[in-house]
Image (cartoon, rainbow, N blue to C red):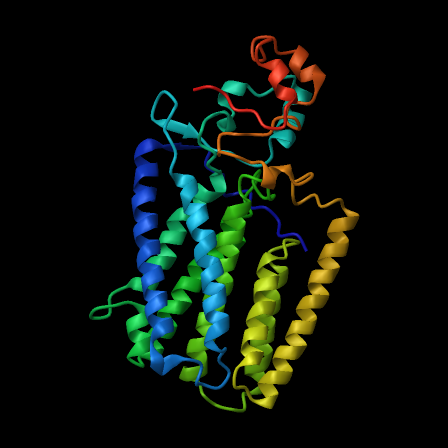
Amino acid sequence: MVFSSLAFYSPSRSISYRYLSFLRIASVAAFSAYVYSQAYALSYPANKGQALSSPISGFLVALCGISVALNIYWLGHLFFDWDIDGDSLPLTVGWAEDSLDLKFDEKQPLAIDNDPRIFSAYLSSAQARCLPFFIAGNTFMILKIRTGGWAYAWTHELHDMAQVLLACNLAVLLYGVFVLLHVEEDDIITPSNIMTHLVMKTNTGLAVLFLWTCFGVFDPEATPEISEIINNGILFLLMTVGTGPDPTLGLCMLYNLLALLSGPISERWKFSFQVTAALIIFCLTIEFKISKRDGFRWIRGFSGTRWMLESGDLGEISLDNDFSSAHLLSTSPVLYTPSIVPSLSYHNWTTAS
């Protein structure tokens, strides 16, 4: 099921140098504090998977490590040389091939000078939209309770407060996943925004796993109510199908269920998690078959493996798909000069600053 794009939310198409500087400082600071709090909570000896319906610590550490690695790589996209005139940098929005198809009908092709990918920066509008909420979500995890954030509440057995902070963190991440990643004109996955999708959805999966870990201590009843089982299954399924054909969050939910099944668990919860996992696998299979039938229209720019193996610096871009139309080249002699046109046939092309 494809999550429809939100017409009322217009994607940002540029970012100022001052705002970018703020995002650099705030995101790195919040993320560093977040990693410290997670490491502190995971290393605390009193909370290593002793509660019922909680995952063993190894699953938490593994997913946390994957999330941290993805976040570090993603935040690295913010740091580049500002090699353009002025104080505003264009952002990549959507898929340029779709934009050119629209302009082809109007006979107004896009100007190369306005394509953000020709600069050394390769910053996506999706990342710029999600970063403030990424910072806010991490802030909820490090809000001070005397001397620490949720880690302090967790290690000092203030499980109700830890639950509240984790829930706030999850709510912010869900807003990013279900709203900010599905805006009009920027609701497909491309090489420029795929890391934003991976980071936001993996962080959401980790937040769910931490929330369940806290819930296992906060509500240690061995036999859950039927309503609890149904609500839990519905939430897992909604997070799986709500993100559309992209299986990232659904796979994170499967991982979470495997982690919960690995720990101490009652028979009723065990059966519930097994049924939920089977339903998630069924939903992911159906989504894959539908996507395959439709030609994977929700993802663009990943033909072959060169985008991954030979991407080089962020300034290296692929224009062979975006400017393949000879009509566009011939109708825009001002925009596409003879010195530039021959370079368009190469897979990777970098302009000189």
Q: Position of residue 307 (x, y in %)?
A: 61, 38
Which quadrant holds the C terminus?
top left
Q: Left or right: where does residue 171 sit relative to residue 348?
A: left
The spot of residue 244 in percent (x, y) is 64, 54
**Residue 315 appears anywhere in the view:** yes
Residue 5: x percent and y percent? 59, 46
Q: Position of residue 32 (x, y in %)?
A: 32, 55
Front residue (pair 8, 256): 256
The residue at the point 62 percent across, 52 percent down is 3
Q: Classify residue 240 by image quadrant.
A: bottom right
Residue 140 showing in the rendered view: no
- Does 351 appear above or below 226? above
Name the residue at 36% across, 58% down.
138
Q: Quadrant of residue 159?
A: bottom left
Nearer the observer, 258 or 102: 258
**291 in relation to 263, above or below:** above
- Residue drawn 35% across and 32% down? 16
Q: Give the residue at the far left of this rendering.
A: 146
Identified at 41% across, 43% down, the residue is 76
Farthest-out residue, right:
293
